Each structure stands twice: as structure tokens, then as C-alpha cells.
Image: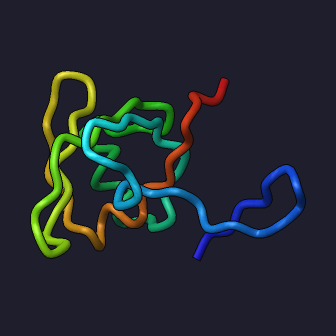
Amino acid sequence: MVFRINLNNSLSTPKNITHLNIGEHAFIAAFSNGFIACKLMAMGLLPGSEIILVRKAPFGGACYIRAKQHYVVLRNKEAEHVILDSEVSK
């Protein structure tokens, strides 16, 4: 599991795709699994890419996201490994 230290020095769990609400957008900060990272980067989902959650399947089935001009469906187990940031890092 990946932890991030926020400004008040307490540990918090990083936000991933499963935490997004429908229509919310965020930027990919990192991946917490190398296999998932290779798979998604081959599809063009690179760190710094903006994604938008289009819809979620009922009962935690899958997440349907839009990145650039492409739509991608990720299983929840895959989506949990995509660490997000609300702002693009420079």
C-alpha cells in the first residue's frame, strides 16, 4: 500500500480512481503496481494525464473513464492501483 504525507504530517491513503465521483476529473500521479502501470501506459494513460470518471458499474464492477479522446474500462482491482492527484504536477 502506498501512503502519502500531507501538510499536517499525518498519514493518509492516496486517492485512486475508485474514489472519484461521476463527472469528476483528476490527474494520474503514479501507479502502485508495475504490471498495471505497463498495461495502462501502453494504452496512453501516462502520469500527468487527465482522466474523467464517466460512470461506474453497479456493485463495484468496473470504472468507465475518459482520457484525452479515448474511453477505457478498468476493473476495480486495476483502478485501485492508479494513484491520482487533483492538480497536475509540473
Q: Is residue 2 left or right of residue 58?
A: right
Relative vertical location of residue 73 with respect to residue 41 in this rendering, above or below? below
Residue 27, how many percent across, how many down? 47, 36
Give the residue drawn at x 26%, y 69%: 76
Which residue occupies the foreground of this view, 26 or 90? 26
Which residue occupies the foreground of this view, 40 or 67? 67
Residue 85, how many percent across, how many down? 56, 42
Give the residue drawn at x 52%, y 57%: 15
Relative vertical location of residue 14 with respect to residue 73 in this rendering, above or below? below
Give the residue drawn at x 10%, y 68%: 58
In terms of image quadrants, where is residue 2? bottom right
Quarter of the rendering occupied by the N terminus: bottom right
Relative vertical location of residue 85 with respect to residue 38 in this rendering, above or below? above
Relative vertical location of residue 29 with respect to residue 74 in this rendering, above or below? above
In terms of image quadrants, where is residue 81? bottom left
Which residue occupies the foreground of this view, 65 or 90? 65
Q: Is residue 18 left or right of residue 14?
A: left
Residue 89, how many percent across, how many down? 64, 30
Give the residue drawn at x 13%, y 37%: 71
Quarter of the rendering occupied by the C terminus: top right
